[in-house]
Image: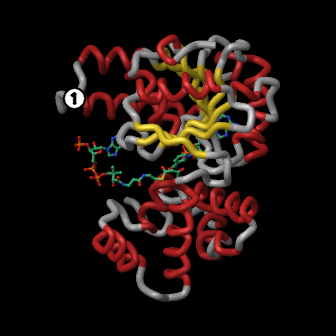
Amino acid sequence: MATASEIAAVGVIGAGQMGSGIAQLAAAAGCAVLLLDADSAALSRAVASISASLRRLAAKGQLSQAACEGSIKRIRCVSTVQDLRDADLVIEAIVENEDVKKKLFVELDKITKPSAILASNTSSISITRLASATKRPSQVIGMHFFNPPPIMKLIEIIRGADTSDEVFAAVKSFSERLEKTVICSQDYPGFIVNRILMPMINEAFWALYTGVATKEDIDTGMKLGTNHPMGPLQLADFIGLDVCLSVLRVLHNGLGDNKYSPCPLLVQYVDAGRLGKKRGVGVYSYG
Ligand code: CAA
Ligand code: NAD
């Protein structure tokens, strides 16, 4: 198994909001990145947004021109899981659905080299259960980035029941190589941050649903009243309402407490395809 400094090739699966940012970070840290998505349009959007983001950093003098262009060149879009056979580390950032993720982990386990580490960027799903879909549970780990990955300074690492000390150490130092601060959570639904954040977002939906205040006043209240960079409804749109709903369902099912039951308004928005900023409409509309 590769140590953090030996991790040279990183596979990133899912080129959405999170996967594109994770690919950017890994490429900027000098890794060859293989970026895979089921949707080729998502790959094109990811390459455009990564290039724009790196060039913005170069224009601001935070990255040399050579490092910027080198990072862009290190990202290769691929179309099948087989293309990840040489990766030292694979970071999965696909849809927040346990069955779909498990299916992918089964495939990854078959095609990646025996020494490869398989990480999930899941927001809430049990790492132990994802690991149990593979024959290498000691090499499966949660590596939870925050949105937007290039800006947010945190990675939450989750060890499954069988994750080895070596894999934990390698992923922790790799996270530090990405210049992130690491926290470590036990493998419980929603881990640390979403266990606390999602009930707040859900409560904001209940406040809106029951007519406590307008969306604007709820968000302004939390921004100026508690010094959050975004109000909870704006943040929910930013994260993706589908992701928020999936996390709340994992919390509700896993912890068995009705306080995590998703607000009907959030459910209705997701049913209507109002998934937030990424779709142009959620609680708010984006031009
Ligand atoms: N990618 C790269 N850089 C970005 C970016 C992106 N998507 N969005 C903004 N930036 C950069 C900008 O270029 C800018 O850089 P400079 O200061 O060097 O010019 C900087 O970030 C600030 O951006 P803006 O001035 O445009 O906007 P802002 O000050 O409002 O900041 C924000 C934007 C960083 C997103 C800020 O609003 C914020 O921190 N929001 C809260 C984000 C948050 O809580 N994320 C965690 C969500 S929970 C999660 O991720 C876990 C989960 O499982 C759901
Ligand atoms: P997203 O909807 O922006 O992107 C998901 C991408 O995965 C899409 O491009 C989709 O085409 C692709 N995909 C779906 N199933 C696939 C499969 N089987 N194989 C290959 N590609 C597939 O979602 P996102 O917000 O980037 O979230 C991705 C993961 O990261 C989720 O597990 C989510 O919970 C987690 N996460 C999200 C945030 C956030 O703020 N959005 C923060 C931290 C973690």
Can you give x and y, in whole percent of width and height, for residue 231 in the image? 38, 67
Quadrant in which the N terminus is drawn = top right
Q: Residue reaching furthest front?
A: 165
Q: Residue reaching furthest bottom?
A: 211
Residue 100 versus residue 137 in the image, above or below: below
* Colour convention: secondary structure
Q: Image quadrant of residue 130? A: top right
Helix, strand or loop at label 1? It is loop
Q: Nearer the viewer, residue 252 or 55?
A: 252
**Residue at x 62%, y 54% (from the top left corner):** 190
**Residue at x 48%, y 69% (from the top left corner):** 283
Mark 1 Cβ inside 8 Å of ligand 1: yes
Quadrant in which the C terminus is drawn = bottom left
Pointer 1 local density, CA inside 10 Å: few below 14, some 14–19, many at least 20: few
**Residue at x 42%, y 28% (from the top left corner):** 176
Give the total number of marks visible in the rendering: 1
Query: Mark 1 highlights which residue?
Result: 62
Can you give x and y, in whole percent of width and height, for residue 143 in the image? 56, 36
Q: Is 139 situated left or right of 181 in this image?
A: right
**Residue at x 70%, y 74% (from the top left corner):** 258
Residue 18 versus residue 65 in the image, above or below: below
Q: Nearer the viewer, residue 27 or 69?
A: 27
Three-letter amino acid code of the residue under disc 1: Gln
Q: Image quadrant of residue 51? A: top left
Can you give x and y, in whole percent of width and height, for residue 279 in the image? 51, 55
Residue 69 versus residue 132 in the image, above or below: above
